[in-house]
Amino acid sequence: MLLPPFYPILDTLTAARHGITVISAAEQILDGGARILQVRHKDFFSAQLFSDLERIASLCHDAQARLVINDRADVARLLSADLHLGQEDLPPSDARRVTGTSTVIGFSTHNEQQFRDALAEPIDYVAFGPIFSTASKGKADPVVGIEELRSLRPLTGRPLVSIGGITRANARAVLDAGANSVAVIGDLFPSNGDLRRRVEEWVRLVGRLS
């Protein structure tokens, strides 16, 4: 499969800290040209959130963009969305029993052993990081760095998404090290709140680099 080189992650808590609703953030990200959008929610999963995700699923459909749900295999299936799993979530082999075989599943890894173990799972892409120090995750794993990314890249032909502290200033080094996509969280939110323009910058940047 092919993943867009720019992989924005809409973290609901980050959006709230910037005073932006999840729906507004999704609209701006998609209007800016993103062709994949992961929604990450680590708090209580409410009926309102599910309603918001239904709306975002509709927005993604209209924009011809992939919607990726973080952690929740059941919600991904209900919304006909893709699924991204972390190390503490349902194992990919079990998630497949919920989503079926057609759902795209990604899996986060944070060191060489997790990366190698992930390759035995029924997943479509691997995420690896944090490449750099990051403030968007409460209990961040140790930084792995560019060279670790470069050394693990040859182990799989599946798409590799890099995450963790990636900005417009260091994205070239990450892509040059072998990442197919760069996942961006914190650098989506400029101080002026104009997500659409920031996403446009990212889309232009990775278009030149990839």
Image (cartoon, rainbow, N blue to C red):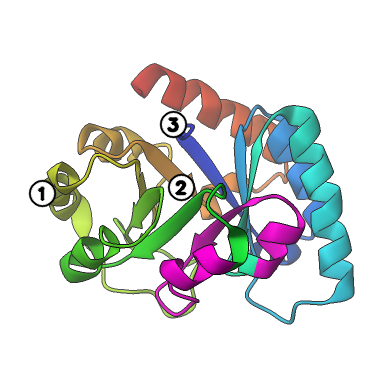
Q: Please state which of residues 46 and 124 is positioned toward the viewer in this rendering.
A: 124
For residue 200, the mark is: none
In which quarter of the view is residue 154 placed?
top left
Q: Residue 92, how many percent across, how many down?
A: 44, 66
The residue at which mark 2 appears reads as 183
Q: Residues within 10 Å of mark 1 (few under 14, many from 20)?
A: few
Residue 159 in the figure: left or right of residue 168: left
Nearer-N-terminus badge (1/2): 1
Residue type pointed to by label 2: Ala
What residue lies at 51% left-to-right and 63% top-to-bottom? 96
> Which residue bears the numbered disc 1?
151
Residue 128 image offset from top left, x and y in percent: 31, 57
**What is the crowding at mark 2: few (fewer than 14 residues within 10 Å), some, or many (at least 20)?**
many
The disc, 3 or 1, on the residue closer to the chain's N-terminal end is 3
Magenta-tinted stretch: 74-97
Q: Amino acid at mark 3?
A: Leu
Q: Secondary structure at mark 3?
A: loop
Q: Which mark is residue 2?
A: 3
> Image quadrant for the N terminus?
top left
